[in-house]
């Protein structure tokens, strides 16, 4: 990452012997290292956070949303002062509030949405990327965490809440449907809307809930229901569940929304909820790795986690001498693939709220057998035990990805204290959106009123 964004991390400087730590201390170490990423990879002048730690990386708006969500965690854990977290949050919120919204190619956003990747210095669109609906939703979710955490009458905390309200209310979710029943995935000034909708079960519950909650530019009343009609319910390895192959799909909306005991119409009919569904998805992943249908090295009941992640590229000989096709950065999934032997340890760890014992077991096994996947005190994005060097060490992804660090930090905290879930249960915008989407039961019955100030 650019030198000017780097800071020394006390958490990373102190490298304990991880195998000597109990589970709580191990989680504490990895969570602190994950939270430190957002300090090290952030631009203090505008608050944007780099997508990866690799040199020249642009900012990812989704990673910036994770940063806003993780600053309160760092405060509560004693790793950051409230004043510093507030200043970092205000800096990036002021940037987005004042950034250029327009339909020309080098703006920061349009219609309240933002481009997927922004230049770390200027904050303008880079890589000719799309105006991203899902990444904007993850950014907004992070803003809402900040809104609920900084809740005093101090002038700067009041300003923060006013900025978040203004930014949320200007997102035109109805425009993002482009006249379709469901949400479009993106838009480009050169060519208009992408020819893909958010169809099939995926990470977009938080997108649809926030789109339903707006009092000024909400998605159509039928939008969420139309999305659930594209779902695919399956039975795999004896588990009935709402199918999505990559494990991150079963995590991302859960980082912000506590789905325990609340159900939409679809889940009510299935006698399930999305939290239980993610538990079953983790069990399916584990069973797939145990069966290991493609015979990849390392797979097993304590080495699992296929997700969207970095990976080796091209065709290479694996440890057995067989030529394997490799997929680079790809959304690997279970059981239909793609699968090239690449495992995402962060995705297994992010399953902690759903299968705590199994997630800790997998983490300890992978750390003990493949210690090279821990770099600078943080979990690398992925490793591939089927591809080894002359010393027998597996391929390991270079650097770190902000999305991995964000989901690890948030899901560890949801497991430990539930702080992100508690904060978002107070968000009137989210509560309104979940209710409009048809969710009922559980904590929603006593949640905040539907109308926000």
Image: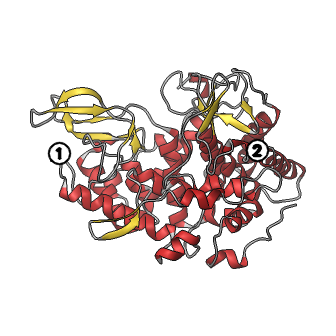
User: What count of labels does the image hold?
Assistant: 2
For image coordinates 37% across by 59% down, the residue present is 21
Q: Which residue is mark 2?
A: 171
| Residue 35 rendering spot, x and y as whole percentages | 56, 47
When the figure is inspected, residue 216 is found, relative to residue 127, above or below; the finding is below
Outermost residue toward the left in this view: 321
Categorize mark 1 by other alpha carbons within 10 Å: few (<14), some (14-19), many (20+): some
| Residue 187 rendering spot, x and y as whole percentages | 64, 33
Mark before the other along the chain sequence, 2 or 1? 2
Residue 236, image quadrant: bottom left
Secondary structure of the residue carrying numbered label 1: loop
- The quadrant in which the C terminus is found is bottom right
For image coordinates 41% across by 67% down, the residue present is 279
Q: Nearer the viewer, residue 62 or 195?
A: 195
For image coordinates 57% across by 22% down, the residue present is 127
| Residue 140 rendering spot, x and y as whole percentages | 69, 47
Q: Which residue is mark 1?
A: 297
When the figure is inspected, residue 219 is found, relative to residue 276, above or below; the finding is above
* Residues at marks 2 and 1, CA–CA distance in whole angstroms: 46 Å
Secondary structure of the residue carrying numbered label 2: loop
Q: Nearer the viewer, residue 219 or 284?
A: 219
Categorize mark 2 by other alpha carbons within 10 Å: few (<14), some (14-19), many (20+): many
| Residue 446 rendering spot, x and y as whole percentages | 72, 78
For image coordinates 17% across by 45% down, the residue present is 297
Residue 194, image quadrant: top right
When the figure is inspected, residue 324 is found, relative to residue 223, above or below; the finding is above
Q: Is residue 329 left or right of residue 269?
A: left
Q: Is residue 207 left or right of residue 95?
A: left
Do we see residue 145 in this rendering? no
């Amino acid at each position: 990452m650019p030198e000017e964004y780097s800071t020394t991390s006390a958490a990373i400087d102190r490298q304990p012997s991880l195998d000597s730590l109990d589970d709580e201390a191990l989680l504490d170490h990895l969570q602190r290292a994950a939270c430190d990423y957002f300090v090290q990879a952030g631009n203090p002048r505008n608050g944007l956070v780099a997508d990866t730690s690799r040199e020249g990386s642009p900012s990812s708006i989704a990673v910036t949303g994770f940063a806003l969500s993780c600053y309160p965690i760092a405060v509560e854990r004693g790793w950051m002062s409230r004043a510093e977290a507030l200043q970092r949050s205000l800096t990036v919120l002021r940037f987005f509030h004042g950034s250029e919204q327009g339909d020309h190619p080098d703006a920061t956003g349009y219609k309240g949405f933002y481009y997927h990747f922004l230049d770390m210095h200027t904050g303008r669109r880079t890589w000719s990327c799309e105006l991203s609906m899902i990444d904007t939703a993850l950014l907004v979710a992070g803003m809402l965490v900040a809104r609920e955490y900084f809740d005093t009458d101090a002038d700067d905390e009041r300003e923060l809440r006013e900025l978040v309200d203004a930014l949320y209310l200007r997102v035109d979710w109805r425009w993002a449907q482009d006249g379709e029943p469901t949400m479009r995935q993106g838009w480009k000034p050169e060519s208009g809307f992408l020819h893909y909708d958010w169809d099939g079960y995926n990470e977009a519950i938080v997108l649809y809930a926030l789109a339903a909650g707006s009092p000024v530019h909400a998605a159509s009343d039928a939008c969420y229901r139309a999305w659930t009609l594209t779902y695919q319910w399956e039975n795999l390895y004896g588990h009935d569940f709402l199918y999505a192959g990559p494990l991150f799909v079963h995590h991302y909306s859960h980082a912000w929304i506590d789905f325990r005991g609340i159900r939409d119409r679809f889940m009510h009919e299935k006698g399930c909820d999305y939290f239980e569904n993610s538990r079953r998805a983790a069990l399916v992943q584990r069973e797939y790795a145990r069966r290991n249908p493609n015979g990849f090295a390392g797979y097993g009941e304590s080495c699992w986690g296929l997700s969207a992640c970095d990976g080796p590229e091209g065709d290479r000989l694996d440890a057995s001498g067989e030529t394997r096709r490799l997929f680079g950065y790809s959304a690997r999934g279970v059981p239909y693939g793609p699968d090239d032997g690449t495992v995402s340890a962060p995705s297994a760890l992010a399953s902690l709220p759903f299968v705590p014992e199994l997630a800790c077991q997998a983490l300890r096994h992978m750390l003990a057998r493949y210690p090279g996947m821990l770099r600078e005190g943080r979990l690398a994005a992925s490793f591939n035990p089927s591809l080894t060097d002359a010393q027998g060490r597996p391929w390991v992804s270079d650097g770190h990805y902000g999305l991995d660090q964000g989901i690890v930090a948030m899901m560890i905290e949801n497991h430990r204290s539930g702080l992100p879930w508690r904060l978002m249960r107070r968000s009137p915008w989210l509560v309104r959106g979940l209710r409009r989407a048809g969710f009922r039961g559980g904590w929603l019955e006593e949640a905040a009123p539907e109308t926000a100030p």
